[in-house]
Amino acid sequence: MPADQPTPIFRNQEELSRLAASDRIRYRLVGAKCRYHANDNIARFIADGEIEELQAEVEAKMQDVLRSLVIDTESDHNTQDTARRVAKMYLTEVFRGRYIPLPAITEFPNIEHLNELMIVGPITVRSACSHHLCPIMGKVWVGVMPNEHSNLIGLSKYVRLCDWVMSRPQIQEEAVTRLADLLQSRMQPDGLAVVMEADHFCMQWRGVKDTDSKMINSVMRGSFLKDANLRREFLSLLSRKNA
Ligand SMILES: [Zn+2]
């Protein structure tokens, strides 16, 4: 077994407390046979105070990265605090969707029995690609076709759920599917459509340096899949709003 893999033997609390926070959390994840890919949420395996420990750990390693990039962080005042800033940005801002629990969302019953197409968007998306950790900046539109048994959620809640899914390293196809799964499970609508359009900074900043290319992805479920007219109505309303 490679040295960086956690050993499957039982560790007691005292042994665990001597481990680095990331090893402790990984130990719990492996014990629960829980996946921890870049776009997985691992909040329930993190104990109080461990986010701060993770931040300190990432800061120390980021300092080593700067050292290996041969940047003189001692005399270069611009980079003196960079390792700390980057660690904080990763854990509490741009990747926080991995580390914080699902935001509390109240659904309310569809008392008015709304059964007309609802469109929410554009919702601003800030994410990162899991290949290069480069930003992905874009917009999401959600189409919902409720039925009388659907739960509805307030407009601002779409933004919070979207942000929770997006603030993780991932690829766009998986991000859109994750968001659709989450909305589907909360609302149980007859139809659900999610469209995401985004700039990928790994295309613009590096690689082919194509500054104009955008990637568009969509997920259609239920009545949006079966009913071509509904799908057309949704997409035409989007293109009108986009113009
Ligand atoms: Zn990339």
Image (cartoon, rainbow, N blue to C red):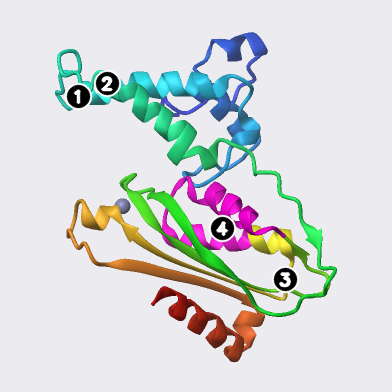
Which residue is tagged 2?
64
Element type at mark 1: helix
Q: Are marks 3 and 4 in contact (CB under 8 Å)?
A: no
| Res. 178 mark | 4
Q: Is residue 83 left or right of residue 8?
A: left
| Res. 68 mark | 1
| Res. 189 mark | 3
- Residue 239 found in image quarter: bottom left
Q: Is residue 191 left or right of residue 39?
A: right
- The kind of residue on which mark 1 rests is Ser
User: CA gap, disc 3 to disc 4?
Assistant: 16 Å
User: CA gap, disc 1 to disc 2?
Assistant: 6 Å
Q: Is mark 3 within 8 Å of ligand 1?
A: no
Residue at x-position 19% and y-position 52%: 206
Residue at x-position 61% and y-position 35%: 43
Which of label 3 and label 2 is nearer to you?
Answer: 3
